[in-house]
Image (cartoon, grey):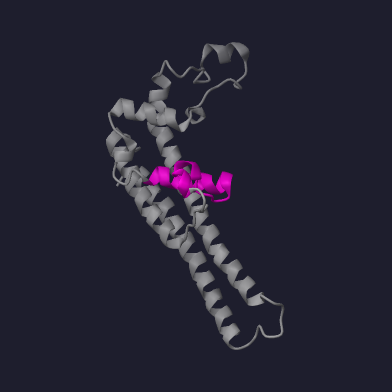
Amino acid sequence: MTNANFVLEIKLNGLKNFLEHIDKEANAEIQDLCEKEDAGDFEGKGIGDFGNELFFTSMRKEITARAVYYELNALMESTLHACAHRLWLDSSKHKGPKTILDSSILYNGSIRSLKMVQDLKLVDILELIEKEYGINIDNLEEGDIFKNVREVVNSFKHRDGLIDFRKNQLEDTIHLKYHKVDGKQAYEAIDKTHIFIKALWTATAKEPI
């Protein structure tokens, strides 16, 4: 096992551990709340107290799953950037300066104009990789996980979880739908991300040392 794969497994197992701890704690809290409700401990208290407590605990579990999606998205993006880095350096289409040794930076004495591969749009990153290696990212094993995770993350970031209704037929936009993620989905996304990154490394011969 390479150092890179070892580090990847540590990161992904760390996310699973995060999920497990929050899930265990929340489930125990939900069970405790239900037992108190059955025992009548919420009688005479504010209206909806039991429901509110239950909601907050359930919400914590969902937020945890969302956080895992954010981490997976960042991990896959950084992996794609690494795969595209040399291609970007050699590209005449994407202009520089690309290193601090570039004459324009040395002459001006400032690194504010320095470009980085992370500055590229996703479509440009994918174009560099797919053109160089003759692959389609979507066709890699579990290749749809990146765009799926990215879509969910962006929906929560920009639309409060709203599924982009513009991608549906007009008659389907009457009933707006929202993304919901839970622990089970997050566990599955972790495993699929592992498979996808390994497939990407293989396809590009870019598994780091």
Residue 85 horizontal/vertical position (percent): 41, 28
Q: Quadrant of residue 146?
A: top left
What segment carries the magenta color?
Answer: 145-172
* Front-most of residues 67 and 154: 154
Describe residue 140's horizontal placement relative to residue 87 as left or right.
left
Residue 202 horizontal/vertical position (percent): 28, 38
Q: Tell me which residue sits at (42%, 58%) in the image.
A: 185
Q: Can the viewer see residue 71?
A: no
* Front-most of residues 125 and 86: 125
Q: Quadrant of residue 4?
A: top left
Q: Is residue 150 magenta?
A: yes
Q: Quadrant of residue 60?
A: bottom right
Residue at the limit of the structure toward the bottom, as seen here: 39
Q: Is 61 drawn above or below residue 6 in the view shown? A: below
Q: Tell me which residue sits at (55%, 67%) in the image.
A: 58
Q: Quadrant of the C terminus?
A: top left
Residue 204 horizontal/vertical position (percent): 30, 33
Q: Main secondary structure of the magenta part?
A: helix
Q: Is 153 drawn above or below residue 207 in the view shown? A: below
Q: Can the viewer see residue 166?
A: yes
Residue at the limit of the structure toward the front, as seen here: 171
Q: Is 10 drawn above or below residue 111 in the view shown? A: below
Q: Is residue 180 magenta?
A: no
Q: How many marks on residues?
A: 0
Residue 183 horizontal/vertical position (percent): 45, 62
Q: Tell me which residue sits at (38%, 28%) in the image.
A: 127
